[in-house]
């Protein structure tokens, strides 16, 4: 029979965080976050892991290291004593496209004993084995190139639209379409009867039940709610 300490160790080892990153508003309101979260949860289910929370940075470039959701996740991993030591991402370029940023984040994970798993590239991404490190850096370099090309293509596309229409109209934000949504989320996020904050997925469920939609008319998800509130906090700093 397993001892209590052994059971606790196994329970901790089976728990994980998910991390989602999308770089543009179109991706935030599109299917990017949902696709990434689905890949993370499917990988976890197939490998006997429980995803206890998904952190999302939206509208954040892969070249930027200062990300509120990533920072919140790292603080939680370092300080909260919940025993979660595993982070699952959809694929490596969701961690960062820029190679130097990618390696910087990976070094931070290594220093704190956190395992990083990609639903696409697999486990053991943090290994310093020469072959694994080379593959990781090659993937990072490819992602960095793809990002640079994407920026150039988007810039060219905007110029074509501007030349044809005179300007590009931006889509209205969720706050513009639903001014009271922030206050409502704040109320839903407050402590429940158990003395804990409601998880973002639970808040999203309440919003959907009340008939609220995102700016694109889609149902709310935990990552989308978390992203919206992160943006609000960042705008007040």
Image (spheres, grey):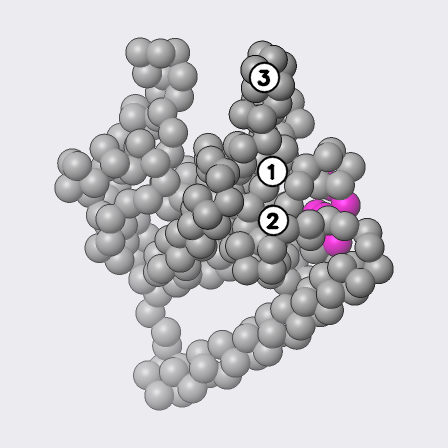
**Quadrant that contains the N terminus:** top right
Outermost residue on the right side: it is: 130
Residue 75 falls in which quadrant of the image? top right
Q: For residue 59: magenta?
A: no
Residue topped by disc 1 = 86
Residue drawn at (54%, 33%) of the image = 14
Residue topped by disc 3 = 2
**Label 1 vs label 2: CA separation?**
7 Å
Outermost residue on the front side: it is: 1
- Decide which of tag 1 and tag 3 comes sooner along the chain: 3
Q: For residue 106: magenta?
A: yes
- Decide which of tag 3 and tag 2 comes sooner along the chain: 3
**Quadrant that contains the C terminus:** top right
Q: Residues within 10 Å of mark 1 (few under 14, many from 20)?
A: many
> Which of label 1 and label 3 is nearer to you?
3
Residue topped by disc 2 = 117
Residue drawn at (51%, 59%) of the image = 23
- Decide which of tag 1 and tag 2 comes sooner along the chain: 1
Residue 165 falls in which quadrant of the image? bottom left
**Left or right position of 18 against 105:** left
225 up-or-down from 26: above or below: above
**Label 3 vs label 2: CA separation?**
27 Å
Name the secondary structure under disc 3: loop
The residue segment tinted magenta is: 103-108
Name the secondary structure under disc 1: strand
């Amino acid at each position: 029979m397993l001892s209590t300490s052994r059971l606790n160790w196994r329970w901790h080892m089976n728990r994980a965080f998910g991390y989602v990153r999308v770089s543009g508003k179109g991706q935030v309101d599109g299917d990017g976050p949902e696709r990434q979260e689905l890949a993370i949860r499917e990988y976890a289910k197939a490998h006997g892991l429980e995803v206890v929370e998904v952190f999302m940075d939206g509208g954040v470039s892969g070249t930027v290291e200062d990300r509120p959701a990533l920072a919140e996740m790292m603080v939680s991993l370092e300080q909260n004593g919940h025993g979660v030591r595993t982070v699952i991402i959809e694929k490596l370029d969701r961690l960062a496209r820029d190679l130097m940023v990618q390696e910087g984040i990976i070094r931070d994970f290594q220093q704190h004993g956190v395992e990083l798993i990609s639903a696409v590239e697999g486990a053991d991404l943090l290994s310093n084995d020469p072959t694994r490190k080379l593959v990781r850096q090659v993937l990072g370099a490819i992602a960095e190139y793809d990002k640079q090309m994407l920026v150039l293509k988007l810039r060219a596309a905007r110029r074509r639209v501007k030349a044809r229409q005179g300007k590009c109209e931006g889509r209205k934000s969720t706050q513009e379409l639903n001014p009271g949504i922030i206050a409502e989320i704040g109320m839903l996020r407050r402590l429940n009867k158990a003395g804990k904050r409601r998880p973002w997925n639970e808040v999203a469920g309440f919003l959907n039940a009340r008939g609220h939609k995102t700016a694109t008319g889609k149902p709310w998800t935990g990552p989308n709610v978390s992203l919206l509130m992160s943006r609000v906090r960042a705008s007040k700093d």
